Image (cartoon, grey):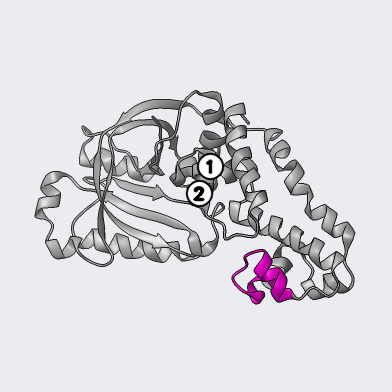
Amino acid sequence: MSHRLDQAFERALAYLDQHLNEPVDFNMLANIAQLPQSHFEALFYALYHISIEAYVELLKSLEAAHLLGFGKQVPFATIAAKLAYRNQQHFIESFIRSIGQSPESFQQAPDWGNFFAKQQPLKSFQTEVNQQDEQSYSVEIVSFAAQTLAVMEHHGDPSLLPQTIARFIEWRRQHGLSPMGSQTFNLFYSTSESAAKAQYRIDIGVSLANETLTSLEPVALESSQIKLKSIPQGRCAMIRLSGEQAVNDSGLGAAIDYLYRNWLNLNDVSLRNFPLFVQRDVIADKMTEEQQAKSLAGSPQLLIFLPIV
């Protein structure tokens, strides 16, 4: 990891270590790290391969294990309050997830070998990521023109995303917004790996030309399902994927990881506070309708944009 990003996360994690007895505010951690809030969680996961939520949960569980192991009479409710869990049940569930032993079992017969093994990610997660073999990608710096989008937001469990996509496709079909005339965009506020299921956020959108925007009925855009949003003009680091990589989720994830973990570390740029986004099935404007159809069917393309200053 670059010295710059290393120091940024050291500041945030040092603050976290000293404030485990307070509710965690990820926006505050991003501000302490001096990193844009819209990239903080995804950047943390790309660098360390553990979500910030899982990291916090592990830190709290390890501290709770100390209290349980050396204080046989400490009530669970006291530990839950001391470490800012929502309630005692939240503490119990979180402890089992992180430590693999219930608080009651640990208090009576702590498995210290497992306890010390659970601390290993805190010591080695950065080293392990740095030692991985990385695929290289061609990255271009481009100027992205502002785009107006009609989007359907997905909040929550990533496994339900196909249902949101199906509803959006149906809305798009009803209003004649075909892939030939309107490009498809996804705005990533988090990734399925970097956020807890309930916190996962992504927008599925379609670009709207001025004439299209004017022709759409107001009711179509004021629907509770559809919102108007804009991607601002500005510089972006761009990776182009095609073929199998463009339709494979693992291919997209690997390219996003490369931008955050490798390219960003090697280049003296700063992130803008706008989420990473992708544009799907890019088609040249001068293609005939038949050529466009063949392009979509035979060699799908995807552009990944990381907004930078």
Percent x, y for residue 97?
A: 70, 65
The answer to whether residue 21 is left or right of residue 145 is right
The answer to whether residue 112 is left or right of residue 209 is right
Q: Mark 1 — residue?
A: 32
Q: Report the residue at 55% width, 35% height from top.
A: 258
- The C terminus lies in quadrant: top left
Q: Residues within 10 Å of mark 2 (few under 14, many from 20)?
A: few
The answer to whether residue 155 is left or right of residue 134 is left
Percent x, y for residue 225?
A: 28, 65
Percent x, y for residue 264?
A: 52, 30
Q: Which mark is residue 28?
A: 2
Q: Are marks 2 and 1 in contact (CB under 8 Å)?
A: yes
Q: Is residue 111 visible?
A: yes
Q: Which residues are magenta?
A: 76-91
The one of 62 and 195 positioned closer to us in this rendering: 62
| The stretch drawn in magenta includes residue 85 | yes
Total residue callouts: 2
Mark 1, secondary structure of its residue:
helix
Give the residue type at disc 2: Met
Q: Which mark is residue 126?
A: none
